[in-house]
Image (cartoon, rainbow, N blue to C red):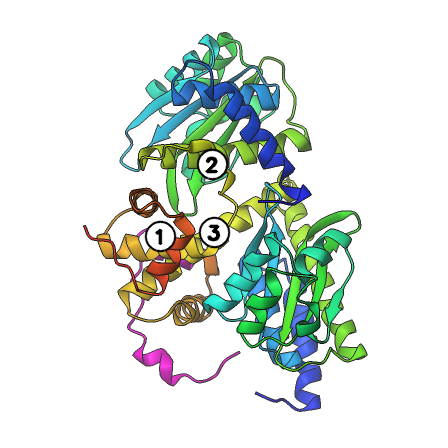
Amino acid sequence: MEIDTAQRERLLLDTMVELADTLVAEFDVVAMLDLLTRRSVQLFSLRGAGAVLADQHGYLRVMACSTEHAWLTEVLQAQNHDGPLLDSYRSGEPVSTPDLEAACSRWPTFSPLAIDAGVRSVCAFPLHLRHALLGALGLFGTETSTLSTDDARWAKALADVASISVAQFAIDQERDSLPACISTAMQNRTIVEQAQGMLAELQSVDLDEAFTLIRRYAQAHDQRLTDVAYTIVTGGLALPQPASTAESAAED
Amino acid sequence: MEGPEHVRLGAVIDRYAFHARKEGSLGETLCATCVDVLGVQGAAVMLLAPGGTHRTLGTSDEVMEKIEELQHTLGEGPCLDAYRHHAPVLVADLAAPDSASTWIGFTPAALDAGAGALFGFPLHVGAGRIGALNLYARAAGQLSVDQHQDALVLADLVTHAILALQAGADDLVGELADIGTHQTQVNQATGMVAAQLGLPMADALGRLRAHAYATSRSISEVAAEVISRRLRLEP
């Protein structure tokens, strides 16, 4: 999974451009945050990354996971009790812990869950716009270390661009306000999760593979992730059996 | 759930609990809660099914009753559009020309009935759609940002109240306080149950809830078991 410096710089730039590209017809907040978390794992060699947004009730809702395995979902959902993403969301500031073992008393719900999952360090960056607090991005590392100064700046820049994209998209939707736009994004994420469960059952794959199938189909057919998911849950699309996708090793 | 951010949902649930203590059907209680929280003149809850059948679960007053009846007979209106398009339909001024051209039959009759502004919000959990929440104000005017946020909270609350009651919940207030947690796993499990039993999403979520009530566990515990394939619901 290690990439060299030149590849990495290229990937950083590509990621910036893709995150900011809200004008394409298939722009989708869910897919944009999915890209943000998956690229973060590649760029910063992490155990996992996740993004949460605050819903209309004030709960932090899981919007994207670099992997759809249960440990990451649980670690992100724990932020409704305590954790670095919650702190970062509330304060609007980055929160970083190089050694999670030392932070057990600070986050009594989050820390044991994360440590059990093999996470040793964590950095969280706010997703926000001036005074509007939207959510947070969490980067989970396997080593007791923190991001280098440069990496932390890059990660913050990616989180900022993602935040601006959400706001820009809300403006592009004209009469829709930011809360309405986020509410729609959450419904879309819900549809993707329902589709994941459905595919996992129908094709006997795990939830992570199910998500990959949906994503690959959307990319291959130039469709929005949430549109593909909606077609699946309403019974209008049966994806091909996963045998063919297992061979295509190229992970973008 | 602790934490200062959950104030909005908590406040809405408190108002619901207040109205639930009075005599009245679920529909009446939900409508009274919406009118109370939002400060609009009226609310109605419309249940719809993909086949086109629909019924009104509750209305808060005679104007709203008339508006529901119009949408029912004419087959058009903002509430129906909110359901069909999965998105809120906000008509700040019903007398403006574009609402007359959007709903040719409905608009003049709704104005006659006494509505100046109409707001329709879909009642849904992802792809599981159950109906729409309809709100009216006598005077034209947009919902404030705060009202809009509250209306989204209320639409969610109404959706979950209906689904929970259909599944046989007895502690509705306790159920509602839990709607923000463990959503990812509940949604994924809902998708799995829908595939296992060949059900629409809203019904699959109902089955998941009913199983939780029957076994005295939380829906998130049941969802975790379904996801890890330790539990399979039987038809």
Residues tagged by mark 3 and mark 1 found on one chain of the structure: yes
Residue furthest to the front in view is A105
Q: Residue furthest left?
A: B235
Q: Quadrant of the N terminus of chain B?
A: top right
SS for tag 3? helix
Task: Residue A61: give its label.
Answer: none
Left or right of A171 on screen, residue B81 = left
Residue at x-position 29% and y-position 54%: B193
Where is residue A185 drawn, in percent x and y? Answer: 55, 50
A155 and A231: which one is in front? A155
Eyeballing the image, is B146 above or below B63?
below
Subunit bearing disc 2: B
Q: Which image quadrant for residue B169?
A: top left
Please tell me which residue lies in front, A236 or A101. A101
The amino acid type, in three-letter code, at marker 2 is Gly
In the rendered image, which residue does mark 3 sit on? B183
Residue sitting at x 51%, y 38% = B177
**What chain is tagged by disc 1?**
B
Residue type, label 1: Thr
In percent of width and height, residue A91 lies at: 77, 54
Q: Is residue A57 above or below residue B233?
A: above
Badge 1 element:
helix
**Circle nearer the viewer, 1 or 2:** 2
Q: Which residue is the site of mark 1?
A: B190
Numbered-mark total: 3
For the residues labelled 3 and 1, the Cα–Cα distance comes to 10 Å
